[in-house]
Amino acid sequence: MKFGWRGAIGVAISAVLLWWTLRGEDVTRIWSVLTHSNLALWAASACFATLIFPLRARRWAALLEPVAGRLPFSSLWQSTAVGMMVNNVAPARAGELARAFALSRAEPTVKFTAAFASLAVDRLFDGTIVLLLMVLAMLDPAFAQRNADSTALLLSMRFAAAFLATVLVVLALLVAAPARVFAIYDGTVGRIMPGLAPKGRHLLEGFASGLGVLRSPRLLGEVFFWTVLHWLCNAFAFWLGFRALGIDVPASASLLLQGIIAIGVAVPSSPGFFGVFEATGKIGLGLYGVASDQAVSWAIGFHVLSYIPITVIGALYLTRLKLHFRDFSGAGSAPQA
């Protein structure tokens, strides 16, 4: 995997945001806050933060059932762990490619394009549920009491909702009228770039095949259940981190904060989303009147403790699957693998 200019931009953005987060903060004060926090609650927080990845793997089983049947949980979990580890150490969200590629290696009957397409639906469900939970958090009277002016936040949510709606329309067209989409593709890309059109058409067909879950009410319900459980588990991990530091905010704050962070990490950043996570964590807790040193302490503490376990687990599975980082560089050109 090449670093490239996108990686350089991401690192630059992360560096600027990390500087902004720590600007004016007393680092020794932050260290003191962390060292005097509740280690047992931090350990519990890290456990629940890691638990979301097996839940994500379980959801993936339902997403892939239409094209691959019920896959073994072990293959899905190992591939998910590898992908999340790669996201933590490589630029440009390479973990999404790595996750699909690792599964296609662990389960040769699964096409890479189908596995990768299922991740688009995976992220669509994530975005929808996260936004819904944010709305619930903002309906909590405790939010209005602590933050009378939420104009900027509401504007950000509108942009996120518009983006999700656009993605949903495109996916719906691929599900309801794939032949029509293919015809439009052939009539545009086929004429403009005839040399690349066949490969693109093959990828588009594989992508459409990964959207079968959208045709089954049963599978949609199953994916919805696991998505809600995933994000409630993540929010609970946030809340345990709050309690570890003695941060006094309503439980609904964790629902709002995870949404703000999820929107924030969509921008280019360094591997592991460092800088972006800390900045959005500081902003989100600031909405509830949390002191900046406590907010930054939480963001750093939670980020590090949630980063380490899945990175180590993913690295172990990478070795077990006999994969190397160079294998992922050609993932996009190997749809059958």
Image (spheres, helix red, strand yellow):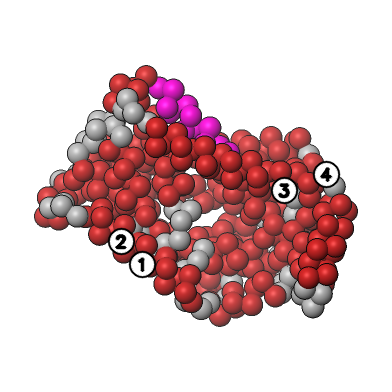
Q: Please state the horizontal and vertical placement of residue 326, each as a whole percent of the image.
A: 56, 80
Sequence-wise first label, 1 or 4: 1
Q: Is residue 138 magenta?
A: yes
What residue is rendered at 85% in x and 62% in y?
Answer: 187
Residue ID for mark 2: 16
> What is the number of the mark on residue 170?
3
Is 148 on the left or on the right of 54, as rendered?
left
Q: CA distance from mark 2 to mark 3?
A: 34 Å
Q: Is residue 34 magenta?
A: no
Residue type highlighted by circle 4: Ala
Residue type highlighted by circle 1: Ala
Please state the extent of the stretch shown in magenta in the rendering: 128-140
Graded by Cα atoms within 10 Å as few (under 14), some (14 to 19) or many (20 or more), the crowding at tag 4 reads few
Is 330 on the left or on the right of 291, as rendered?
right
Q: CA distance from mark 3 to mark 1?
A: 32 Å
Sequence-wise first label, 3 or 4: 3
Q: Please state the horizontal and vertical placement of residue 146, each as a whole percent of the image.
A: 29, 26
Residue type highlighted by circle 2: Val
Disc 4, SS: helix
Instruction: State the predominant SS element of the stretch in magenta.
Output: helix
Q: Are marks 2 and 1 in contact (CB under 8 Å)?
A: yes
Q: Are marks 3 and 4 in contact (CB under 8 Å)?
A: no
Sequence-wise first label, 3 or 1: 1
Indicate which label's residue lies in the foreground, 1 or 4: 1
Residue type highlighted by circle 3: Val
